[in-house]
Image (cartoon, helix red, strand yellow):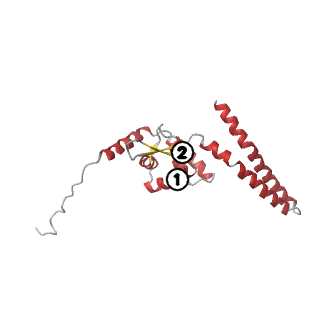
Amino acid sequence: MSAADSPAPSRTTPGPSAEDAGRAEDADRAVDEHRAVEAAEQAAAVMTAAGMARMPARVLMALVAAPADGYTAAQLAERLGVSAAAISGAVTYLHRLHFIERLSRPGTRVVQYAVVRETFYGSITSNAPIYARMAAFIDEIAAAHSGDAAASARATEMADFFRFLAERFPQLIDEWRQRQG
């Protein structure tokens, strides 16, 4: 038997570390706890249609439907059937927007991701000054079209709508918080 005919040497790899075994148990637990997968995917599709990037929308909705302690990046990848790189980009984006938070487990390097409470309410409230600025700019557009009644009316209506949003969103959030107790 020549060297070319001999079997390749076998390579022995060490068994999983305790940390790896813990991650595997976490992934197994997550598989058993995935709930509302179809509803989360449909909600993500609506968010995508409204302009949010697809993967951040899917990750956000998966976290809305996650168990109480959230998901690790590996659990998110498993739930969504995507790569770790896709999850990494999405969680970075969502974390930057303050939609999700990173939760560390004491004594491990495992990071869980969870939705920040009142995320959307804060986001809407913080956009009120943006709506007011948009109204002011669109008022300038209306003024520049004083000789074109249709263009002026279109811009004025849009500016009025943005002013309405700037005034009402903070009030709506206050009403929501009162309603929640």
Q: Residue 5: x and y, percent?
A: 15, 67
Residue 83 in sight in this render = no
Q: Residue 66: x and y, percent?
A: 49, 40
Which class describes the residues within 10 Å of circle 1: few (<14), some (14-19), or many (20+)? many
* Residue 85 placement: quadrant: bottom left
Residue 42 in sight in this render = yes
Looking at the image, how many numbered discs can be counted on the residues?
2
Q: Nearer the viewer, residue 119 or 85?
A: 119
* Residue 24 placement: quadrant: top left
Q: Residue at x 57, y 55 (%)?
A: 53
In the picture, the quarter occupied by the N terminus is bottom left
In the picture, the quarter occupied by the C terminus is top right
Q: Nearer the viewer, residue 115 or 106?
A: 106
Which class describes the residues within 10 Å of circle 2: few (<14), some (14-19), or many (20+)? many
Q: Nearer the viewer, residue 103 or 113?
A: 103
- Farthest right residue in view: 147
Helix or strand or loop: what does disc 1 sit on? helix
| Kind of residue indicated by mark 2 | Met
Left or right: 81, with 7 as reference point:
right
- Give the mark nearer the N terminus: 2 vs 1: 1
| Numbered circle sitting on residue 73 | none
Left or right: 162, with 104 as reference point:
right
| Kind of residue indicated by mark 1 | Met
Q: Residue at x 80, y 50 (%)?
A: 160
Which residue lies under the disc numbered 2?
61
Q: Residue 25: x and y, percent?
A: 35, 41
Residue 33 drawn above or below residue 146: above
- Farthest left residue in view: 1
Which residue lies under the disc numbered 1?
55
Residue 9 drawn above or below residue 35: below
Helix or strand or loop: what does disc 2 sit on? helix
Estimate the spatial distance between the alpha carbons at disc 2 and disc 1, rounded to whole Å.
10 Å
